[in-house]
Amino acid sequence: MRNVIVLFASLLLILAGCSLFKSSPPPPAPRPLHLDTTATLDLTNGIDVIGSTKLPQGFAPNPDVPPMWLAEDLGVAVAGSQNGKAVVLGLGGAKFNDRVTIANDFGPGAPAGNILNVAASPDGMELATAVAEPANKRVNLMLVDSISGGDGHSVASFDGYYDVASMSWLNHDTLAIVLRESIAPAQPPTNIDTVSSQSGLYLIGITGLGTVSHLDKIPCQLSHLSFSPNGRFAASEGDSEAAPAIVDVQSQTCEKIRSAAPIRILGWAPDSSAFLYAARGDSGAVGTFRFSLATARSTLVVVSSAAAAYASDGTVIAMGNAGLTWKRVIQDPEAPAKVEIAIIDPQTAQITINTLGFRTPPTMLAQSAMVFTTASDSAAIDAFVLLPNGLSRELIDYSYPTRSAFVLASGAVRSPLSMSWSPDGRALALVDGDASRSMLTVMIPPR
């Protein structure tokens, strides 16, 4: 079986899709040559690479911030650190080789402090930074034009020091920020542009004169939020000081989610009726769950996997193994299991299983991740396979419309990586490597 795993590490995978019955996959194609590489992976021959550029020596990408698409796909912003400072680089032009610094600590986008958080607007025209300004004892919310650059301008500021400053864009005109105070408030503000220091959720309107609204009636502690497509609800992931919760932004109410903190929000249903999240079950093993707003209950989707997403039609796409149970994972976490894609209709509970053609232990399956785009209903899957010579990473493209998969790249696991799809769902941006060598690679998976 080990030989089969090695053979499939860089081959075209054609999935067999048939409800609970699986047909045998076709014979594998000849092993392709690797002509291009990322910072850590070999790209499968034939992949259309439209951009590949080395990031500056000493620049360490931040794996928690996926590549941010700017100005209608004309560029990509990459967040990281260099020489002890937070930095956001903008890359564009031919092959994405033109590089500018969009923001950095005590520089553009953060002239008086350190960048706590960064988020690109839905159209990529602006970059928002949350900046801790120690000399002014406040957090400043800045906007930078992603095309013309510059220092940016402030749209709101908050007196005090904060443990949490989590931002997200609700739409082109509205930013949401969650603040949680760590030290007693500073003196009251002296001008109308500064909001009094209080923890909680703020909505900032950035058009015209701008507005700042504090949703101060929400009764629960908040952490990083993921907003529903209609903007009415937000799932709070929880942390050491806050329990996971679902928040009704309109009525300013919240309800705790019965799960150990933190959870990781994987995606919302297109109609905002439910969301997927990864968390540890009662056994301590990782699993993916679906929380329904109608019932306020969570149901198990897949065991020992956090790779799941919603397709544009509301179908759940999840990677895992249909035969895995909590008991089996606990008893033998290193026993190889066949890796499968489950296509689940939440309304009828009908499940179609496709096999990806390789095996991996539940411990490795639990480390995998999925980045999905509803624009083309495609998934980029970061999967891991345990081979005799060590751990191998498989970057797999999965198409929901065609039920097909293709290995885009493979190689040894040497650093974290982050990925994001272009707004039109056509191109995939990949950032991998560390301070010794890191790269941005932009490719178009085969269709």
Image (cartoon, grey):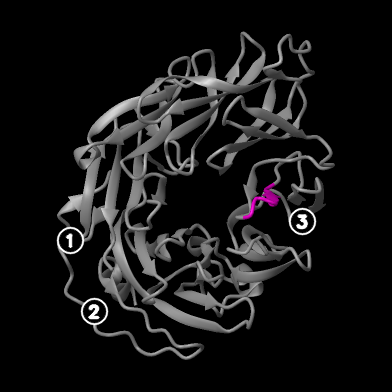
Q: CA distance from mark 3 to mark 1?
A: 45 Å
Q: Which residue is mark 2?
A: 28
Q: Which residue is mark 1?
A: 45
Mark 1 nearby-residue class (10 Å; few <14, some 14–19, many ≥20) = some
Q: Residue 258: image x %, image y %?
A: 78, 58
Residue type at mark 1: give it: Asn
- The reply to whether residue 322 is in sight is yes
| Element assignment for label 2 | loop
Q: Earlier in the sequence, mark 2 or mark 1?
A: 2
Closer to us: mark 2 or mark 3?
3
Q: Earlier in the sequence, mark 2 or mark 3?
A: 2
Residue type at mark 3: give it: Ile
Q: Which residue is mark 3?
A: 257
| Element assignment for label 1 | loop
| Element assignment for label 3 | loop
Q: Is residue 167 above or below residue 309?
A: above
| Left or right: residue 316 compared with residue 260 | left
User: Which segment did they paint magenta?
Assistant: 230-237
Residue at 48%, 81% (x, y): give it.
353
Tell how many labels: 3
Residue 104: image quadrant is top left
Pick the quarter of the image with the C terminus: bottom left
Mark 3 nearby-residue class (10 Å; few <14, some 14–19, many ≥20) = many
Residue 293 colored magenta? no
| Left or right: residue 168 compared with residue 54 | right
Question: Circles 3 and 1: CB distance less than 8 Å?
Answer: no
Which sits in the foreground, 182 or 314? 314
Closer to us: mark 2 or mark 1?
1
| Left or right: residue 308 compared with residue 398 | right
- The reply to whether residue 159 is in sight is no
Which sits in the foreground, 57 or 346? 346
Pick the quarter of the image with the N terminus: bottom left
